[in-house]
Image (cartoon, rainbow, N blue to C red):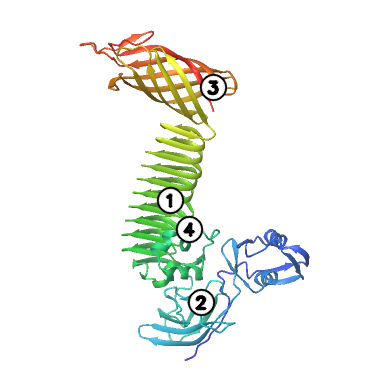
Amino acid sequence: MPILCMFFLSVQGQHNLSRRIEMPKFENVKLRVIFDQLKKEESVLFSFNSNLVDLDKPIHAAPFRGLMIDYLEVLLGEKYTFKETNSHIIITYAPQRLNVHTIDIDTLKNNRAKITGYVMDVQTNKPLDLVTVYDRTTFQAASLTRKNGYFELDLKNLGNTVTVALSKENYRDTMLVLLLPIDVTNPDPNRKVGYHQTLDSTKTIANSAFGRFFTSSKQRIQSLNVGGFFVYSPFQISMTPGLSTHGLFNSQVVNKFSLNIIGGYTAGVSGTEWAGVFNVNQFDMRGGQVAGVTNVVGGDVRGLQMAGVANVGLNTLKGVQLAGVWNTIDTLIVGAQIAGVANLATDATRSLQIAGAMNKSTNEVGNQVAGGINMAKKVRGIQLGVVNIADSSDYPIGVFNWIKNGTRQFSIGLDESQFAALNFKTGGRVLYAVLGAGTYIDDKDLRYGFETGLGGFLVKKKRFSLSAELTHRIQFDKDWKYNEANRSSLRIIPAIRLNKSLQLYAAPSLTYAEATRKEAGANAVLWKFWGADASRKTIHGGGMVGLSYTF
């Protein structure tokens, strides 16, 4: 049976790598200078791990005329391998080589064939396990070598030739081009392939807790071996990640439509994906993704994610995450996170977080709305919650705010009803919360009161400030029995700064006060210039004077 085997470096779409270039002589020049010149003259960008490629390494290179890939091998040596995306040349460290021995092909019925062989290390001649072997022609079959280096690959829908690719981390990619004695229609030569560029290896499915939980060790090893290479497919159906129409190669396939009965593990989606339990995408999700329990995306999310429990994104989001329990994303570029319990993000500068219990953005956030706690480093819009915590937030609205670069103030005061109060005011540079308690000096019906409210600065100068506060007071008698006669007040508070920390203020107010001793038939609201009527609902003028301490 005639078989032609060819071993060569796997390079996808060598538009830049196969370009002919001409470079001058370099003497003791840093590698970064040469890369900058290639970027300027050839419009080429490079991507690599800075721990593996030293840009400050001095280079001595003779004048060169030839292919880009050959020049890169002159600069870096044969221990590096090169792939490319539409915009970047990817440089990876691959010091080791592998080889294939004893290739056998068994032709089966229905245009199928079974390819077997053994993979060895070129230098040690020892068998290599966990090498990914896949069909580079149709991308429909893949397997991992066993401990003795043995592999089996079942192929279907074959042409006259088939390309088998072998990949393993830290080994140079190798391909076998096999001539087959099968006379069938050739597969589509325009099959679209691509390469996903991962800039941060910590933000990948293989290194995430969710990825390890939902995928097997074999699938994660395959992802490391093959790296960012992927192929597009119209659709896939899977029962579980290991039972898919794409087999073990499913983690390298981007689908337009993906249906996972229980769960699936694919390279990504560029369309729609549905799952009864979970969806796991190694790279990007573009379109819509719905899961009964959780969606996990290792790349970028562009579109809508909906999950009964959780959406997990390891990189960026432009779109919306909706989850019954929680959403997490590294960078929310623009869009919203909406969750029943919590939203977590590293950065959400121009976005909205809405949660039943908690929102957290480690860096910046646009707006946050929570039934419990909002947390961020810098808030560009509003924070609306019971508790708001931030380094910088100008518009927090809550019962308690702790803004590092905002307002923190204790104030004592006495108002027209002879209520002596101690208030704690916390918030941003514009809005702040009022939380206080006090006692009535001379009132037959009332003894204690607690106030909450919202305040805002209208003018804030070095020696003078003007603010407005809207507060609500609940009241108790001397036996701590609740009195239904609540009070709501609008205060305008001019204050003069006495020194760095102390301010003196005198604040006129307009108050609505309910009757503390109701009279039969007295339901109409009474308007008074000053002070409340204990037997009538009253809208009246008043005021408060006091002293504030800022810290």
Q: Helix, strand, or loop for circle 4?
A: loop
- The answer to whether residue 161 is left or right of residue 22 is left
Do labels 2 and 4 touch, CB within 8 Å? no
Give the percent coordinates (x, y) of residue 207: 48, 61
Q: Which disc number belongs to residue 459?
A: 3
Which of the pair 48/211 is nearer the observer? Answer: 211
Q: Among all residues in the image, which is located at the extreme top?
A: 529
Give the percent coordinates (x, y) of residue 100: 52, 83
Mark 3 or mark 2: name the one nearer the start of the chain: 2
Give the amino acid type for the residue marked by disc 4 in the picture.
Gly
Mark 3 vs mark 2, CA separation in Å: 70 Å
Give the amino acid type for the residue marked by disc 1 in the picture.
Thr
Mark 1 vs mark 3, CA separation in Å: 39 Å
In the depicted structure, whether residue 199 falls above or below residue 409: below
Which residue is denoted by mark 1 in the rendering? 328
In the depicted structure, whether residue 355 falls above or below residue 513: below
Mark 1 or mark 3: name the one nearer the start of the chain: 1
| Quadrant in the picture for residue 250 | bottom left
Crowding at mark 2 (Cα within 10 Å: few <14, some 14-19, many 20+): many
- The answer to whether residue 121 is left or right of residue 311 is right
Q: Helix, strand, or loop for circle 3?
A: strand
Mark 2 or mark 4: name the one nearer the start of the chain: 2
Mark in front: 3 vs 2: 3
Which of the pair 312/403 is nearer the observer? Answer: 403
Which residue is denoted by mark 2 in the rendering? 166
Do labels 3 and 2 touch, CB within 8 Å? no
Q: Which disc number belongs to residue 299?
A: 4
Mark 1 vs mark 4, CA separation in Å: 13 Å
Question: How many numbered callouts?
Answer: 4
Q: Which disc number belongs to residue 497?
A: none
Q: Helix, strand, or loop for circle 1?
A: strand
Residue drawn at (51%, 77%) of the image:
166
